[in-house]
Amino acid sequence: HDPEPSFVAIDKLTSIAEHNDIKVHIVFNKCDLDKNGETEKISSIYRSCGYEVHTFCASLSPDRVRDELGEHIKNNTCVFTGPSGVGKSTIINALYPEMPRLETGSVSHKTRRGRHTTRSTVLYKASDSPNGYLVDTPGFSLLDFERFRFMKKEELVYSFPEFAPLALSCKYTKCTHTKEEGCAILERVKSGELPKSRHDSYVALFEDLKNHHDWEEKNQKNY
């Protein structure tokens, strides 16, 4: 797609949402640009993990956007977030064409990144729902787990829903699920029952989180 999907970026967002009990829907937009079937391959990974996944091109198929996402917004507050250039504002325009048109832009051919047409977080009232709201957020290229402590390292495994049940039954009580021989999660990854890309993201995030200490969190709260 344009920009290309990033497993680590998706997994950072989903883990933060899961940790905060936020319902996740994963959307792959601009599917008209996919000529090699990558969308279905990536979608199948996240569907196998229990996520609801939507694939479309919002600018070409606004009716499909409304059919797939409209009911999930009613009476909920929904946040659209992701890297610059993936088409968050275009999706909102497709959902509610009667609303003031949100500014959209193309991806820079030089940097392959979006141009940040949404520059601030904006709350919109859903016109077909008394208690429905949409939040359009600025695009980003980095979620820094190293500088910001979104959760404790021991909590990370439970933010991967396909890992959580296995973590509870793992033979090691303090297993990090990164390299231990006989770890229930690692065994499933080796056998192909769990996606390797998801475990690669887990290990990368764990490495960032393990550099944080409890006293740092206390100092941040005091500050």
Image (cartoon, grey):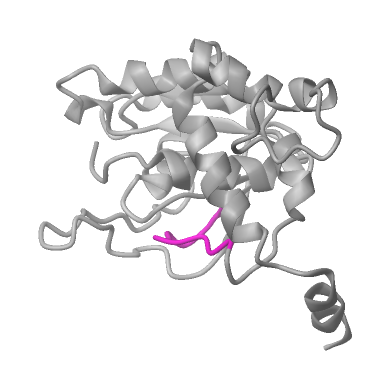
Q: Is residue 180 magenta?
A: no
The image quarter containing residue 65 is top left
Q: Where is 102 relative to 182, above or below? A: below
- Residue 75 appears left or right of 53: right
Task: Give the residue furthest to the front.
Answer: 181
Say which quadrant the N terminus sits in: top left
Asked if 163 appears above or below 188 in the picture, the reply is below
Front position in the image: 32 or 182: 182
Tell me the residue at 59%/36% (across/down): 179
Main SS of the magenta part reads: loop
Relative image position of residue 39 (x, y in whole percent) = 32, 22
Residue 77 visible at all: no
Viewer-side residue, 108 vs 143: 143
Q: Residue at x 50, y 69 (%)?
A: 120
Residue 83 in the image, given as x and y percentages of width and height: 40, 53
Q: Is residue 4 visible?
A: yes
Give the percent coordinates (x, y) of residue 21: 79, 40
Residue 149 sits in which quadrant? bottom right
**Going by the picture, which residue comes out furthest to the bottom?**
223
Q: Is residue 42 left or right of residue 125?
A: left
In the image as oriented, which residue stretches furthest toward the left?
Answer: 110
Q: Where is residue 188 shown, x and y percent of the image? A: 59, 15
Q: Is residue 143 magenta?
A: yes
* Magenta-colored span: 135-145
Q: For this view, does 175 lie left or right of residue 59?
A: right
Count of numbered circles in the view: 0
* Residue visible at 34% across and 58% down in the picture: 103
